[in-house]
Amino acid sequence: MNAPEARGAHSHDTLDVTARGRYGARPMIDVTHPELVELPARIEGERVVVRPYTRHDGAAIFEAVTSSCERLSRWLPWPKNHVDVRFSEAYAVRCAARWMARDDLAVGLFDPHGRLVGGSGIHRLDWKARNGEIGYWLRDDAEGRGYVLDAVKLLTALAFERLGMARVKIRCDRANTRSAAVPARLGYVLEATLRHDRVDLDGVTPADTLEYGLVRADLDALPWYADARARVLAAPL
Ligand SMILES: CC(C)(COP(=O)(O)OP(=O)(O)OC[C@H]1O[C@@H](n2cnc3c(N)ncnc32)[C@H](O)[C@@H]1OP(=O)(O)O)[C@@H](O)C(=O)NCCC(=O)NCCS
């Protein structure tokens, strides 16, 4: 039973009868109990493999984050927390537990040789509103190879096809042009520029946030979506 329509049918859920287009109809995913939503253990993209962390990823996470800490810390608050391998191992275990509970879906990005090149995930899940937010980072020597574009395609399709999401967003600092290029390249819609909606990581400088979004009605127009969807649906649950 590979077709999502055939699984998880539930009286709390309905197909979106107002939907239009090829991907307009929402798969019948029961979000009343997110813990029961079935997810693939790994998804293979064109360039990366995406899978949830296990405890054994701790050393690779520590090495990737600490080797790139300076660059990552310009935009992210957490890299400096990885002070030793045990912290990274504990982080991996926490991510695995949250994945299991469908509470937060962090994944590692692995190149064809199985090397951890970065991380991504679907975060801030709101199962009632069927919304989630994709985030990402790469180690220094993995930038500029299309790994994150590839991963975001897969996670977007995962969100719409396996989580039954209605909207997926990507937010970044307005000054983080490299990050903003990811959703822009993929055809995400720039929905808002939130001026001075928070402060920079220095804790004082006002900063602007860009918010990009996709809803189901946008999917037909995305040239990459059919391939990403096929990869997600082909991944064993
Ligand atoms: C944001 C970040 C993940 C983007 O990394 P990235 O390397 O630009 O993104 P991708 O992996 O998708 O690669 C795209 C680049 O690979 C190039 N590329 C090379 N081969 C490619 C291929 N086969 N397919 C697609 N792109 C390819 C693209 O041209 C593009 O490079 P360019 O921007 O110089 O033109 C990275 O800069 C990062 O880790 N930043 C710090 C953390 C951060 O800011 N996270 C986001 C917080 S909101």
Image: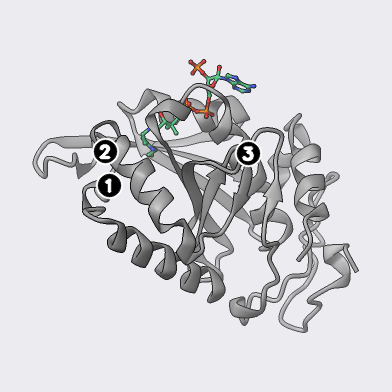
Query: Disc 2 versus disc 1: distance between alpha carbons?
Result: 6 Å
**Residue nearest the observer in this picture, 95 or 5:** 95
Which quadrant does the C terminus fall into?
A: bottom right
Which of the 4 image quadrants contains residue 11? bottom right
Residue 143, percent from left and from top: 46, 26
Q: Taking the image as drawn, is residue 124 in sight?
A: no
Q: What residue type is labelled 2?
A: Cys
Query: Disc 1 versus disc 3: distance between alpha carbons?
Result: 22 Å
Q: Eyeballing the image, is 11 above or below 27?
A: below
* Residue drawn at x 52%, y 57% as measured from the top left: 132
**Residue nearest the observer in this picture, 10 or 139:** 139
Q: Which colour scheme is used?
A: one colour
Which numbered dot is residue 79?
A: 1
* Residue drawn at x 70%, y 76% as measured from the top left: 30
Mark 2, residues whose alpha carbon is within 10 Å: few (<14), some, or many (≥20)? some
Which numbered dot is residue 127?
A: none
Residue 169, percent from left and from top: 51, 46
Q: Eyeballing the image, is 59 above or below 164?
A: above
State if disc 3 and disc 2 touch (CB < 8 Å).
no
Mark 3, residues whose alpha carbon is within 10 Å: few (<14), some, or many (≥20)? many
State if disc 1 and disc 2 touch (CB < 8 Å).
yes
Which quadrant does the N terminus fall into?
A: bottom right
Q: What residue type is labelled 3?
A: Val
Q: Taking the image as drawn, is residue 232 in sight?
A: yes
Residue 158, percent from left and from top: 67, 54
Which numbered dot is residue 48?
A: 3
* Residue drawn at x 61%, y 30% as measured from the top left: 186
Query: Dot 2 corresponds to which residue?
Result: 69
**Left or right of residue 172: residue 144:** right
Q: Element at badge 1? A: helix
Q: Mark 2 or mark 3: which comes first in sequence?
A: 3
Q: Element at badge 3? A: loop
